[in-house]
Image (cartoon, rainbow, N blue to C red):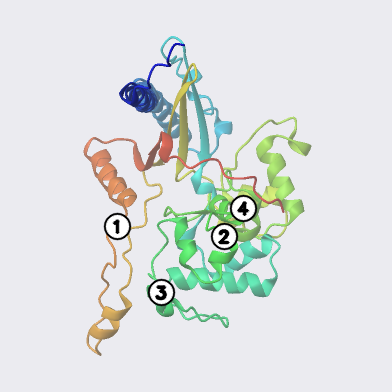
Amino acid sequence: MRQPLPRNPLRSSVLVLVLVTLVFTAAALTAFIEKAGNDLLVEVRRSDSKRLRQEAFSALEVTLAVLEDFREADNGLHSTAEGWGDPLTWAEWTPSAGRTVDISFRDESGKIPLSHADLTTLTNMFEAWQMAPADAEKLADAIEGWMAKGYSYTTTLTPDYPDAAVPYAEPQRPMRSFTELAAIDDARDLFFDENGLPNGSYWRFVDDFSLFNYPLPNANGANADVMAAAGQYTDVQRGHIGDFLNGTGQYANDGQQWLQNAAQLAAVAGPGGSAGAFGTTIAALRINVTVHDGRSQYRVSVVVAPQGGATTNQTLATNATAAATNASPSTTASITATAQPSSTANSATAAAAASQSINYPFTLLEILEDDDIPQPPPALPQT
C-alpha cells in the first residue's frame, strides 16, 4: 500500500505569502488608478478653465464697450429696455468655433443701499414681508444698531454680544458681507436655519438690499419689496409701474419702457407713494458671463459702476473700548479698525485706482469667477 506524501509546510507558507502580496498589490494599484484619475480630472478642468477664461473676459470687454456706447448716447444706463440686453449680438461678436457665450444682467442699484437704509425703511421692508409690526421694528432695530455709529436702541432689544463665548461689539459701520447677519441678535434666527446655513429669508434680504454705496435705488430695476419699502407703493401702484416697464396692461401697445425721472414715476404710479425715494439711472450693474464648450463651462460675475456711480463702503469699524478709553472733553473718540478691510474691498480699491489711471469708463466693484460665484438662491418668498 502506497504511503501518502508528507505535507510541506514551507510550500503552504509561500502560497499564502504570494496571495497576500497579490492582494496588497491589487489594492495599491486600485488606489493609484483612482488618484491618477482624480488628478487627471483636476488637470483637465484647469486646462478647460484656462481656455475658456480668456473667452469669458473677451466677451466681458465687448459687453462693457457696448454699455459705454449706450451710456454716452442716453446720458446714462437705465434699463435693458434701451436695447443693450444682448450686447454680443449688437456688437456682432462671436466666440471661437464650438463655443457659446451667455450674458445676463442684474441691476444691483435696483436694491436699497444698506448703508443708507434707516430704521423706518428697514421696518417698512420687514412689514412688506408680512412680519408683525413689533417684530419688524425689533429686527430693524438690531440691524441698525449693528451698523450705525453711536446708535441707541429704540426697542426692548438688549444685545448680549459682550457675553458671547468670544466677546465682540457692534462694528458701527455698514455691512461688508451679508454673512454678518449671523452675528446680529434677532437676525441670526430669522436668516439662518438650524444648521447655520442661509435660508429663504436670507436670500430675500440679499435680493432687496445692496452692500454697495449709492444714494437711491433705481426705480427701473427695483423689485416689489423695494417699491413697497422705499416708495411705500401699494399693490395697485406697483402693478401700474410693472405694466409700464414691461409693456403690459394699459401699456401693451408701447412695449418695454424705462422711467426717465421721479416725476414720470409719480405719474405712472398714481397718487400717493414717494417717487423722490428713487433714482432712474443704474449706479451698479452685475454682468454674468458664461462660456460653454461642450460639457465644460466657465463663469464670470462682475459688478461695474459707471463714472459717478456706486462705490464700495470703506468706513472702518469703531473700536468701542479704545473710544471709551481715549475720549476726553477736548478730543473726539478716535476711530480705529478692528479688522483689515476685506479682500473684496482692497481689490475694488485697486481696480478703481487702475481704472482712473487708464481712463477706463467703468469701475470694477466686484469680480467673482467660477466656483467663487454663489449657487443660485432658493425661490424667494412671494408677497
| Alpha-carbon span between mark 1 and mark 4 | 28 Å
| Alpha-carbon span between mark 1 and mark 2 | 24 Å
| Alpha-carbon span between mark 3 and mark 1 | 24 Å
Q: Residues within 10 Å of mark 4 (few under 14, many from 20)?
A: some
Element carrying mark 2:
helix
Task: Tell me the residue that label 2 is attached to.
Answer: 191
Q: Residues within 10 Å of mark 2 (few under 14, many from 20)?
A: many
The tag earlier along the polypeptide, 1 or 2, is 2
Judged by depth in the image, the label closer to the viewer, 1 or 4, is: 4
Task: Tell me the residue that label 3 is attached to.
Answer: 165
The tag earlier along the polypeptide, 4 or 2, is 2
Dots 2 and 3: beta carbons under 8 Å? no
Instruction: Indicate the position of residue 257 as horizontal and vertical percent values.
Output: 63, 35
Residue 6 visible here: yes
Observer-nearest of 241 and 317 = 317
| Alpha-carbon span between mark 2 and mark 3 | 21 Å
Q: For residue 253, which quarter of the picture?
A: top right
Q: Residue furthest front?
A: 1
Observer-nearest of 372 and 357 = 372
The three-letter amino acid code for the residue at tag 2 is: Phe
Judged by depth in the image, the label closer to the viewer, 3 or 1, is: 3
Which mark is drawn over residue 341?
A: 1
| Alpha-carbon span between mark 3 and mark 4 | 28 Å
Instruction: Indicate the position of residue 44 as horizontal and vertical percent values.
Output: 37, 21
Side (left or right) of 314 relative to 310: left
Q: Is residue 48 above or below residue 299?
A: above
Side (left or right) of 148 relative to 255: left
The tag earlier along the polypeptide, 3 or 4, is 3
The three-letter amino acid code for the residue at tag 4 is: Gly
